[in-house]
Image: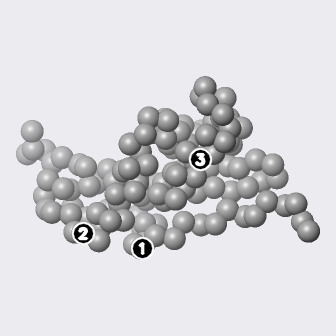
Amino acid sequence: MSKQPAPLAPVDLAVDLAVDAPCCPSLTERRVPAETAAVLAPAFKALGDPVRLQLMSMIASAADGEICVCDLTPAFDLTGPTISHHLKTLREAGLVDAERRGTWVYYRARPAILRQLAALLAIGPTQS
């Protein structure tokens, strides 16, 4: 029996969040459809935790476009399993992709969903 870890499964969302176009107009322009809200709500919920928001920031701002879990864990006064739980939540919400390379896992932000979340929250110039 192999002791190799199982590959990380890709996130399977009901709506394709890989497209580069915004998902919908800003919520100040039009009501968010129920289907869109159901797909995007887990991402907002995942970002609602301070540790996950910091992790997301570290991943999204990584110089090479990706960051090793070995560089994320020391930044927090939390155990490795707790950081892994938070990273799993970000993966399941579709915010990051992960790739195992030997012992370590590397995380990349999914820019398309970040653009969609930003577009949904954008306030037009006529809004105050």
Pick whichever of labels 1 and 2 is earlier in the sequence. 1
**Relative side of 76 to 39, left or right:** right
- Badges 1 and 2: C-beta atoms under 8 Å apart? no
* Residue under numbered circle 2: 34
Task: Indicate which label's residue lies in the foreground, 3 or 1.
Answer: 3
Mark 3 belongs to which amino acid? His
Q: Quadrant of residue 83?
A: top right
Gap between marks 3 and 1 measured at Cα: 23 Å
Q: Quadrant of residue 128?
A: top left
Pick whichever of labels 3 and 1 is earlier in the sequence. 1
Residue displayed at 26% across by 55% down: 120
Gap between marks 1 and 2 measured at Cα: 12 Å
Q: Label 3: how many residues lie within 10 Å, few (<14), some (14-19) or many (20+)?
A: few
Residue 60 picture location, percent across and down = 51, 44
Residue displayed at 48% across by 59% down: 94
* Residue under numbered circle 1: 14
Count of labels shown?
Answer: 3
Name the mark on residue 85.
Answer: 3
Label 1: element kind: loop
Residue 20 picture location, percent across and down = 40, 64
Mark 1 belongs to which amino acid? Ala
Label 2: element kind: helix
**Where is the N terminus found, in terms of image quarters?**
bottom right
**Relative side of 81 to 58, left or right:** right
Mark 2 belongs to which amino acid? Ala
Gap between marks 3 and 2 measured at Cα: 28 Å
Label 3: element kind: helix
- Badges 3 and 2: C-beta atoms under 8 Å apart? no
